[in-house]
Image (cartoon, rainbow, N blue to C red):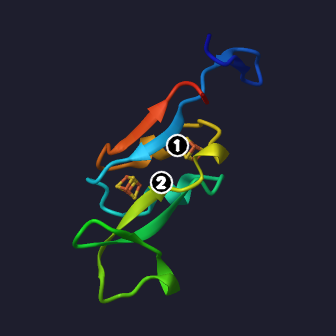
Amino acid sequence: MDDLFASRDGSRWLPEYLSQIDVSCIGCGRCFKVCSREVMHLCGITGSGEIVGAGEDADDDEVERLVMIVDHPGLCIGCGACARVCPKNCQFHIKSSN
Ligand code: SF4
Ligand code: SF4
């Protein structure tokens, strides 16, 4: 059975948790900006597809582009805001926390 949550007015709310972002992500950062829960972060990806750290952790010579990585899926509250702003429709959401 799905988890049962309620809105303030008592109506049913079914969370949709961010589970994955696929390779078509363009690293625009829109989802990060609207998320209040630190669920995902921008990381560098090399030409061979290896994920490397962002910012000071990334070796700029190796990084081909930036992609958004779901590194803390357990923090997601399933609000769906990230899906609404993604221009690439490259996110996967699941209806259950299990
Ligand atoms: S569904 Fe909400 S809480 Fe979860 S990652 Fe997206 S914006 Fe953040
Ligand atoms: S909004 Fe979509 S395309 Fe932009 S960083 Fe997030 S997942 Fe990637």
| Placement of 17 over or under 62, stated as above or below | above
Point out which mark residue 81 bears: 1
Rendered location of residue 79, percent (x, y): 59, 37
| Placement of 74 over or under 62, stated as above or below | above
- Place residue 60 in its image quadrant: bottom left
| Placement of 60 over or under 91, stated as above or below | below
Mark 2 C-beta closer than 8 Å to ligand 2: yes
- Place residue 11 in its image quadrant: top right
As measured in the structure, the alpha-carbon distance from the residue carrying label 2 to the one carrying label 1 is 7 Å
SS type, badge 2:
helix
Q: Amino acid at mark 2?
A: Cys
State which quarter of the image contains the N terminus.
Answer: top right
Q: Residues within 10 Å of mark 2 (few under 14, many from 20)?
A: many
Mark 2 lies on residue: 31
- Whichever of labels 2 and 1 marks the residue nearer the N terminus, that label is 2
Q: Quadrant of ligand 1?
A: top right
Are the residues tagged 2 and 1 within 8 Å (C-beta)?
yes
